[in-house]
Structures are given as C-alpha cells and as structure tokens.
Image (cartoon, helix red, strand yellow):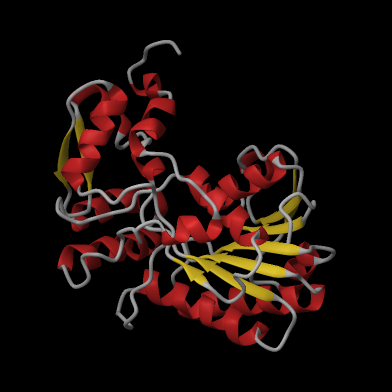
Amino acid sequence: MSDHMPMRVAVVGATGFQGGATARLLAERNHRVRTLSRRPEADRPELPGISVAGGDLGRYEDVRQLFEGATHAAVAIPLVYQAEKVMRYAQHIAKAAREAGLRRLVYNTNTRIPDRTTNVVAFETRRLAETVFRESLSQSEVEVVVVRPPVYLDNLFSPWNGPALVNDGVLAYPLPANTPTAWISHRDLAEAVHAALTVDGIAGRAFDIGGSRTLTGPELATAFGQGLGRDIRYVPIEPTVFEQGLAQILGHESASGVAGIYHYMASGIEPDLMSGDNGATAAALSVKPAPVDEWVTRQPWQLWTGEPA
C-alpha cells in the first residue's frame, strides 16, 4: 500500500486532541477526510479541509454514513469508560467498516494496555474495543492495525502546566519520578497512525508506539530545560489530586477513567508499561519521533508568559 495514493479516511474522534491531530495530518497530505461529531458546529475545533457531519457513535445509521465510500479508518474512542457504551460504539464501527469494504482500520487505544487484565476501566474498555474489532473483522477483508501510545507531551503545553513551566521552572505531572516513559507528541502519534494506515505487511499487528527516548521525570525535566533554556525540576503529583482537578474540566466519570491510568502507574505493578521498545516500532512504521527538547523548542511558550509572539 503506497502512502502516495490518496485515501478516503473516516476518522473517529477527530474533534478530540488525538484524533484531530491525525485528521489534520491526513488532510495536509491530500487525503479525503471526514468525521462525525455530536458537538454543535460553533463548538467544534477548526478542522480545515475535513468534512464534519453531525452524528453519534451510538446510532448505527450515523456511523454507516460516516464510513460510506471510505477506504480506510482511523479510530479513537472518546473519553467514555462505560463498558456497554464502548462495546456498542465498537460494534457499530466494526459493522460499518465491514459493510463499507474498508482496506484497513487503525485503532488508537489512547493508552498502553497491560498484558494482564486489570480493574482499570481506561485499560479494559480499550482492550474491549480492540477485541471487538479483531473478532468482528477477522472473517472480512478489513485489515486491523492497533497503535498503543504512552503519555502525551501536549498534556504539558496546557493552562495547567504551561505557566508553571515557563514562570516557575516546575514540571508537575501525576507519574512517579522514576517511571520510565516514552513521551510522544500528538503530531508524532498522527505520523504513526498515518504509517499504520499505509505501510505494507503489518496487518493484525499492535504497536506500542512512543517517543524518541524513554525518560524518567527528572530526565524529562532536563529535556524541557534544554528546550526552554532554563532550569526545570520535576514534581510528581498525587493521582488523587490530579483527578480532582481534572473532574472540574471533564466531569467526575471521565476524570476517574483517565486518572485510573495514573493510579495504576503509581502502584508500581508494571513500572515499564509506558516505556519505549528500543526503536522497534519506529523501524517497523518508518517513523522518527522528534526529541523532547526539539518539540519543546517549537511550542509558543510565550502564550503562558503574556509576552508577544
């Protein structure tokens, strides 16, 4: 499959940060992209060159229309952590993919997933969706490829982290300081999804994608310091405190779902879950994530200082 051949891609989750980065990159590369959104038009992010239809993943007819005429799909489940609802979404997507005769569906799990079953809904609902895709499409011509990212650098370029980073030299995040993490940007996630849509010979595989290096908290702070040109120190946040703050933005249910990942990491049960794979995935997908300090240098940090661009 050549990445020079235009695709018609149904992107599920394009009004979110991760799916939006994927949709924009695909549109930049002249693929035809469309998505589905429950949000009113005035409340949607800017998605230039992307067709957005009103609809809901919970209604099969809406999903079927999204996939009609598509050749590929890039799927990210919204911040929903009710197993029954996630299963219904996944079943609708799988059925629509099969009926549309897609060539390949790439599923972004939003997070790494432990090998063993856990009581963490953020892991288990995403595992459930992957199982639905694989089982429902196993007898079809639709290829399934899965990407499992760790933690996003873009989380740190936010109103909650940006001011403390540039004004106080503090990088605060709810991961233990000694947790090795292959931080990745939304843009590099999009590059990995694009590769997963186009690279030959990877049908059925799952990739634990990640950034260019695996870093502990203090090492991440050093990389940020290099990019910002100042001393930065890492401060771990208690997951409960993080969850309380997130609930004010996402609501208690979604915040609890997201925070479950950090509670799990704080437990130390699987400290290497978010780490890198020594370049194996980058080689298989022919992607080259940017070093953290390079990514930091590219961001408009003056947004948090009040200085002009």
> At 44% across and 70% down in the image, what residue appears?
81
Question: Looking at the image, is 294 positioned above or below residue 216?
Answer: above
Q: Position of residue 266 (x, y in %)?
A: 18, 62
Q: In the drawing, does residue 213 fall left or right of residue 235?
A: right
Residue 136, quarter of picture:
bottom right
> At 71% across and 42% down in the image, what residue appears?
29
> At 67% across and 83% down in the image, what residue appears?
137
Q: Position of residue 185 (x, y in %)?
A: 44, 44
Q: Quadrant of the N terminus?
A: bottom right
Considering every residue shown, the one lying at the far top of the view is 308
Q: Quadrant of the C terminus?
A: top left
Question: Looking at the image, is 265 positioned above or below residue 88?
Answer: above
Residue 268, quarter of picture:
bottom left
Residue 68 makes an appearance in the image: yes
Residue 13 makes an appearance in the image: no
Q: Position of residue 9 (x, y in %)?
A: 73, 57
Q: Nearer the viewer, residue 129 or 297?
A: 297
Considering every residue shown, the one lying at the far right of the view is 69
Q: Nearer the viewer, residue 78 or 32?
A: 32
Q: How many tags in the picture?
A: 0
Q: Position of residue 178 (x, y in %)?
A: 14, 54
> At 20% across and 56% down in the image, what residue appears?
179
Q: In the drawing, does residue 211 fall left or right of residue 108?
A: left
Question: Looking at the image, is 118 positioned above or below residue 244?
Answer: below
Q: In the drawing, does residue 20 fall left or right of residue 92?
A: left
